[in-house]
Amino acid sequence: MRTFILFLLCWGTVIFSYSQTRETIVLTNVGLDSLKKVVEARTNYLFSFEKSETPLLVSVVLDSDNFVDHLRNALVGTGYSLSQWDRFLYILKGAELSTHLPEGFFTPSSKEIHEVSDYEVSLAKRNQEATSASKIYTIGNPNTLFLGNRATVSGYIKNQTNGEPVSNVFISDAASGVNVMTDIYGFYRISLPLGKSDIVVRQYGFEEITLKLELFADGVLDIVMKEVVYSLKGAVVSAEAIQRRRSTFVGIEKLQIDRIKHIPSAFGESDVLKVMLTLPGVKTVGESSGGFNVRGGATDQNLILFNGGTLFNPTHLFGLFSSFNPDIVSDIELFKSTIPAKYGGRISSVLEVNSRQGNSNKITGSAGIGLLTGKFHLEGPLIKEKTIFITGIRTTYSNWILGMIPKSSGYRNGTANFNDITAGISHKIDANNTCYLYGYYSTDQFGFSQDTSYKYSNQNLVFKWRSNFSSKHIMNLSLGYDGYKHNITEKANPINAYEMSFFLKQFFLKAAFDFLINEKHNLSYGVNGIGFDLSPGILSPHGDDSLVAPDGVDKEKGLELALYVSDKWDISHRFTVDMGIRYSLFSSFNPSTYYHGPEFRLSARFLANDKWTLKGGFNTMRQNIHLLSNTVSTTPIDIWKLSSAHISPQTGWQAAMGIYRNFFNNQCEASIESYYKWLNHYLDYKSGAVLNMNKQIEEDVLETRGKAYGLELMLKKPSGKLNGWIAYTYSKTLLREAGKKDIYEINNGQWYPASYDKPHDVKIVANYKFTQRFSLSANVDYASGRPVTVPIGVYYYSQKYWFAYSNRNQYRVPDYFRFDLACNIEPSHNLTLWTHSVITFGVYNVTGRKNAFSVYYATTQSNKVQGYKLSIFGTQIPYINYTIKF
């Protein structure tokens, strides 16, 4: 009830902000000319009157509530009358103006009854479907009076081949300068002037359509797009390039799944997260590492959403594969700087991954096999044009690789495998209401010996209800459950055998509303609620012979509530501002602690001309959950912790700006973005800190301040025979202990590089199509070595030699370089074939470079320090994948 009241207050504040405050004015013996000027300047009324040789003078009180009644009374006895129609006022001689047609005016006589034409039938339909550019589509009834001079056209755009919604479609009206994009549901909404309009609908991979519209009122127009195979020499105007310029957000990256599948990766598995690492400003501490770092943020500062649910560990097999099945994924969107107000809970970035809805026309599927993984997916309609499903499973059979490891390594008897399943179902209730249900489950098990085993899993269940209240007002309601758990089993000695486990559960409810106020203002508002249930650690004996005493760290519970509102304001055709505020409240139990505060979001875009775009943005963020890990790379057994009386929420702000330029008829795009970020209450650790089963963890963690800044350059060619991008990033990420004391634990209180600070970063992704079926893909990755703390000497103490270490992260491992190459044989375009095959083969790390993932040290017999490099993939890795589609 409290949340509902706060929500109403928030909405009431927004509505009030758009109202106009008017003062009371008394007018005495003024002419109608003067009255017209005052009325139109002070109110929303439009004023007209019938001129006369003898001027009419009136006395009237001008206020916001009773002005019309005052004016009507002032005209009594003058021979004039006042007529009102909506906000139009007319002063005429004689009787009032009739605003209604006589009853039965349009009722035909028996002689006038005729056969209903196709044109009138089309007017009677609520939803039209545009499939041809040679027709004129009428929106609204020309015989019905519509107030205003603009109308809103909305609808869904879908693929003619499989009936799936098409996201990121660019719809533009050159005459009025209005441009919009479809959302993940394929929904669009555009405000156009009444009368005739030509709108252009374009998206790469589909035939461009120019639709002729005749608008008389608000209405619905669904659009069907046909897939097209472009000539390799032909020029294709990319909607992706245009959208990047039109968006108000700085640091936003969108990728379709077809781009992801052409980027080489280890063992040939198409990987969403590996593609993210090819983008500017996105880094990782090393090869095959879990998580990623965005513009100087830590891995736990990224909000990873899959169909609206949160994934806490998005990787399989120590980061070798991502948790997302590429056959299910539709598109990905990464917000690196200016983050929309509807998102919260993390202070670095938001990665939103959406799955496909499935083929609405027929049952289809695919099966694939590679060196390490196998996969299968199936999709299609359950009830035609009503209910659609999609599901996919993946598994691995990687133990054969561990069996090839030499016996001397001690890992030959190790095991490593994973499984995941993704499912989704959607049901169209009616033209305005659709429900969705998504589920995800994954599990990983591994162990490098028979004595110790590890297991972790992710679970997500999300229900969504999308309702179009009207063509201008939309609601997206979602509720669900996210879970993550892991455990370690140690059984080398039956007497000391134990099992240690951790779990994190969260339940959420999100209500998001989108309201198109007019062609200038698009209002987004909503409320989010998340309940946390977290167990930092449970220790229990394993087996009947174990003497381990059960133990555990107290559970943690918390509640996070947030209200937000934002407005996208098109000040002019060239200048657009998106401004919002999010107010979040976090309550931690055991003991009860409260944190709250506002988060501000501001971004702006200026179209200098048809080629140049300038953007700027600023946002503040709050994060109430922390990942505790004192290793360089995050591991599956790291634990999460809620903010408490001893650990404050992480907070931060970021300012960013960018310059964008399109070339060659929007075939290529170049961008330069810079940013500065400040972090508070980021957790670092004392040397030798123990995190597992630590009941006083606050004594081993240290709060730090952080700053990050950088410059990102990108040249991108999204389509054509040669496509891909080149990106360069220069960045710095520094931390400093924030303790209020004279003796500091880290680097004497001075700034030091974060463990993921890699100043120089170069990424090249290229795909060259020799024919429509045959293409070659390459991936080049260069980065500065990450910081490390190294021993700089040896000393003897208490009959033992000890290392003397440098300041934290004072040195760096060698620079990283990798070159990958892949050949893609895609399916033929013969639509009569029942099955299509896709073959990909290539080599990961063509040069066989032994990149250092980490370094470790030991003393020689002469008590000197000897360093060693550990490489994950220190040789060429050939691979082949075969997929059959049906």
Image (cartoon, rainbow, N blue to C red):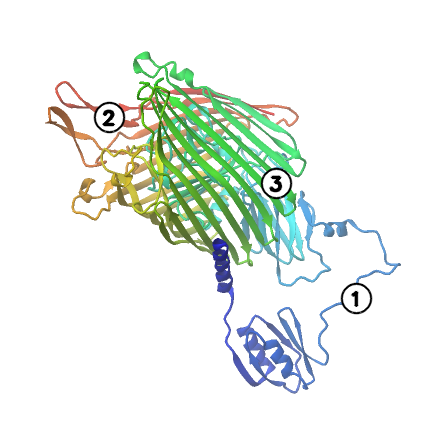
Lateral position of residue 548 relative to residue 161, left or right: left
Label 3 vs label 1, nearer the camera: 1
Q: Is residue 574 above or below residue 534?
A: below
Q: Which mark is residue 671?
A: none
Q: Nearer the viewer, residue 2 or 740?
A: 2
Circle 3 sits on which residue?
158
Binning the other alpha carbons within 10 Å of mark 1 as few (below 14), some (14 to 19) or many (20 upward) gives few
- Above/below status of 56 relative to 289: below
Task: Residue 548: name its quadrant.
Answer: top left
Identity of the residue furthest to the right in this view: 111
Q: Return the mark for residue 856.
A: 2
In the rendered view, does 683 fall on the left or right side of 478?
A: left
Q: Nearer the viewer, residue 363 or 761?
A: 363
Mark 3 to mark 1 CA distance (whole Å)? 43 Å
| In the depicted structure, whether residue 807 falls above or below residue 340 | above
Residue shown at 73%/60% (left/top)?
143
